[in-house]
Image (spheres, grey):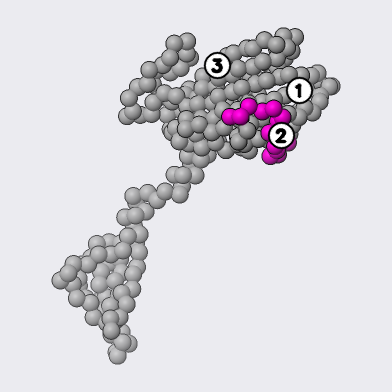
């Protein structure tokens, strides 16, 4: 059985940060579902005679639907382990017909305002600036199935990379929606008063000024004390 090694580089858009991509890579079920060939997956025990360093990894039983011809397809089940790294993910697939695939996904390059990283020799597709997603594949299989397996693997991983970028973009958008902007802080912040300002019982602060409610007379007398314009109304409680 021969081994085939290749590397794929995908430049990342400037607005996707390193942590977002790493979080996507560490989401094992999501990574499995991103593969368009997968139709089912579940947690499982390690394979027999597994290397000691892989025994405590996260293991899944994965089922792919492989289409050999337009009218011929077959479901293929196999086991794979997932191991998180600070900069990415390692996987090891144990498939039928002695198909053995080791992969390493990592994020390389630099973000804005970071020192430029030195690109190793041979990575001609790596950008000089910005982040990039790197996929290292070490595949062992019988020679007569190499063209088929390699084509299916590259097609699946191309779709996986595209969906991964979309997923990272969605996470970025959700993060921005949950983070209040400066305008929101400015509009909703409580009104601050100087130490010299005295408030009598029943005083109400509103967006245009300072009003005092006369409970006995049942009316409101405006008091000309200018305050900064606010969109939020706040009732000052009566002091004992």
Quadrant of res 231 = bottom left
The secondary structure type at the circle numbered 3 is strand
Q: Position of residue 141 (x, y in %)?
A: 70, 14
Q: Is residue 143 left or right of residue 198?
A: right
Quadrant of image for the C terminus: bottom left
Looking at the image, which is closer to me, 218 or 57?
57
Mark number, residue 61? 2
At 70% from the left edge and 30% from the top edge, which residue is drawn?
47
The residues bearing labels 2 and 1 have C-alpha atoms spaced at a distance of 12 Å
| Earlier sequence position, callout 2 versus callout 1 | 2
In x, y percent, where is residue 167?
55, 36
User: Which badge, 3 or 2, is on the more N-terminal residue?
Assistant: 3
Q: Residues within 10 Å of mark 3 (few under 14, many from 20)?
A: some
Labelled pair 2, 1 in contact (Cβ < 8 Å)? no
Q: Any magenta on residue 233? A: no
Q: Residue at x 70, y 11 (%)?
A: 1
Residue 84 appears in which quarter of the rendering?
Answer: top right
**Range shown magenta:** 40-53
Query: Pointer 1: residues within 10 angstroms few (<14), some, or many (20+)?
Result: few
Residue drawn at 72 percent across, 9 percent down? 143
Residue that appears at 64% across and 12% down: 3
| Tag in front: 3 or 2 | 2
Please say if the residues under marks 3 and 2 sit with CB atoms less than 8 Å apart. Answer: no
**Is 190 in front, or is 105?**
105
Q: Position of residue 57 (x, y in %)?
A: 60, 34
Separation of disc 3 and disc 2 at Cα?
25 Å
Which mark, by number, is residue 7? 3
Say if 36 sits above or below 69 in the image: below
The span from disc 1 to disc 3 (Cα, nearest Å) is: 23 Å
Give the residue at mark 1: 96
Residue sticking out furthest to the left? 196
């Amino acid at each position: 059985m021969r081994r085939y090694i290749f590397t794929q580089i995908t430049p990342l858009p400037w607005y996707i940060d390193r942590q977002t991509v790493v979080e996507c890579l560490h989401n094992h079920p999501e990574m499995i579902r991103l593969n368009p060939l997968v139709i089912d997956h579940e947690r499982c025990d390690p394979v027999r005679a597994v290397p000691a360093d892989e025994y405590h990894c996260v293991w899944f039983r994965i089922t792919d639907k492989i289409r050999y011809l337009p009218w011929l397809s077959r479901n293929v089940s196999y086991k794979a382990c997932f191991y998180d790294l600070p900069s990415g993910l390692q996987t090891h697939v144990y498939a039928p017909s002695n198909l053995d695939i080791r992969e390493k996904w990592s994020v390389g390059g630099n973000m804005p305002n970071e020192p430029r990283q030195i690109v190793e020799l041979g990575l001609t597709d790596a950008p000089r600036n910005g982040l990039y997603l790197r996929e290292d594949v070490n595949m062992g299989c019988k020679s007569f199935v190499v063209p088929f397996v390699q084509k299916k693997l590259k097609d699946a991983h191309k779709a996986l990379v595209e969906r991964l970028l979309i997923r990272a973009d969605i996470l970025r958008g959700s993060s921005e929606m949950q983070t209040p902007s400066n305008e929101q802080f400015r509009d909703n912040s409580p009104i601050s008063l100087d130490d010299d300002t005295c408030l009598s019982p029943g005083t109400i602060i509103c967006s245009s000024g300072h009003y005092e409610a006369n409970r006995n007379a049942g009316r409101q007398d405006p008091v000309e004390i200018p305050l900064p314009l606010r969109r939020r109304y706040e009732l000052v409680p009566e002091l004992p």
